[in-house]
Amino acid sequence: MRLIVDRTEGNRVICEQEDGTNIELSVTCFKTRPQDGTVVVWDGILALPDPAATAARKQKLQSRFDRMKKE
């Protein structure tokens, strides 16, 4: 399952699921403390970062921002 890290609150990581709902994971599910906006693949035990998906998401958001600035 793909998730997007929304924020970290203490020992909990709040992630957005593909359907827009949130899920809370323990930081122990991650090898390192994740950054906000990171796309991760969660198998029910571990949440592993997906660098390619994260980069694509950041590029898509940057393109939207750039278009808004031109208007």
Image: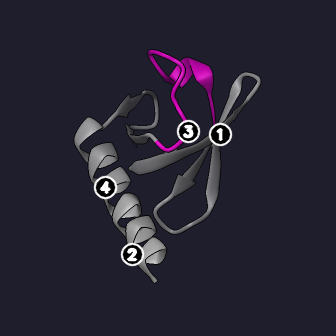
Residue at 54% of width from left, 20% of height from top? 33
Q: Give the residue at mark 2.
A: 67
Q: CA distance from mark 4 to mark 3?
A: 15 Å
Q: Residue lying at the far bottom in this picture: please name it.
A: 71
Mark seen at residue 36: 3
Main secondary structure type of the part rendered in magenta = loop
Q: Name the residue type under label 4.
A: Gln
Q: Secondary structure at mark 2?
A: helix
Q: CA distance from mark 1 to mark 4?
A: 20 Å
Mark seen at residue 59: 4
Which numbered disc, 4 or 2, marks the residue that appears first in the sequence? 4
Of 58 and 20, which appears nearest the observer?
58
Which range of residues does the magenta coloring cover? 25-37
Q: Residue lying at the far front in this picture: please name it.
A: 70
Q: Name the residue type under label 1.
A: Arg
Would you say residue 32 sits in the magenta stretch?
Answer: yes
Q: Residues within 10 Å of mark 4 (few under 14, many from 20)?
A: few
Would you say residue 56 sits in the magenta stretch?
Answer: no
Q: Give the residue at mark 1.
A: 7
